[in-house]
């Protein structure tokens, strides 16, 4: 079983930065692809970023490309999301996700989800 716990959310002004972290409780973290989704009020869950377990190749939604960076520390079973140049439209609950299959931009591609952490960007 895989358990995911996010941290690092909060309130920040537009243009600011936040770093989200996700600690995974899993036997072989390095075998899982990891990612982040977000959900704003009244909207569907949206893919943000993902990172492969094998090559650490990264993937981003167009809306965050160039501003967000996903990274992983296999030795600590942790994945991070560095968010820079934040905008009010980035306000959402951010979820950490994991799969032992291939990277996907669809929520259905990830069987494991964290509880989420709130990110609020004020204008």
Image (tube, rainbow, N blue to C red):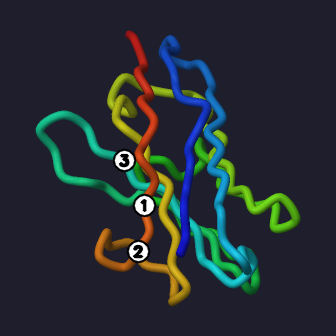
Residue 46 has which mark? none
Image coordinates of residue 91 in percent, x first then y, are 36, 29
Image coordinates of residue 13 in percent, x first then y, are 50, 11
Closer to the N terminus: mark 2 or mark 3? 3
Mark 3 = which residue? 38
Closer to the N terminus: mark 3 or mark 1? 3
Residue 113 has which mark? 1
Residue 110 has which mark? 2
Indicate the secondary structure of the residue bearing disc 2: loop
Task: Estimate the spatial distance between the alpha carbons at disc 3 and disc 1, rounded to whole Å.
Answer: 11 Å
Crowd band around label 3 with a 10 angstrom C-alpha radius: few (<14), some (14–19), many (20+): many
Crowd band around label 2 with a 10 angstrom C-alpha radius: few (<14), some (14–19), many (20+): many
> Which residue appears farthest toward the right when viewing the image?
75
Image coordinates of residue 92 in percent, x first then y, are 34, 34
Image coordinates of residue 18 in percent, x first then y, are 62, 28
Query: Which one is in front in this view, the residue at disc 2 or the one at disc 3?
Result: 2
Q: Residue at x 72, y 77 (%)?
A: 27
Task: Estimate the spatial distance between the alpha carbons at disc 1 and disc 2, rounded to whole Å.
Answer: 7 Å
Which quadrant would residue 112 be assigned to in this image?
bottom left
The reply to whether callout 1 and callout 2 are in contact (CB within 8 Å) is: yes
| Quadrant showing the C terminus | top left
Q: Is residue 28 left or right of residue 117?
A: right
Q: Residue at x 55, y 85 (%)?
A: 100
């Amino acid at each position: 079983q895989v358990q995911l716990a996010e941290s690092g959310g909060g309130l920040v002004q537009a243009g600011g930065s936040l770093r989200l972290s996700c600690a995974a409780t899993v036997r072989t973290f390095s075998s899982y692809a990891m990612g982040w989704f977000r959900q704003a009020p009244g909207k569907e869950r949206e893919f943000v970023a993902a990172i492969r377990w094998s090559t650490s190749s990264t993937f981003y939604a167009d809306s965050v490309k160039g501003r967000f960076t996903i990274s992983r520390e296999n030795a600590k079973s942790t994945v991070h999301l560095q968010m820079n140049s934040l905008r009010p439209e980035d306000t959402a609950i951010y979820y950490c996700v994991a799969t032992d299959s291939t990277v996907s931009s669809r929520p259905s591609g990830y069987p494991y989800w964290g509880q989420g952490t709130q990110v609020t960007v004020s204008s």
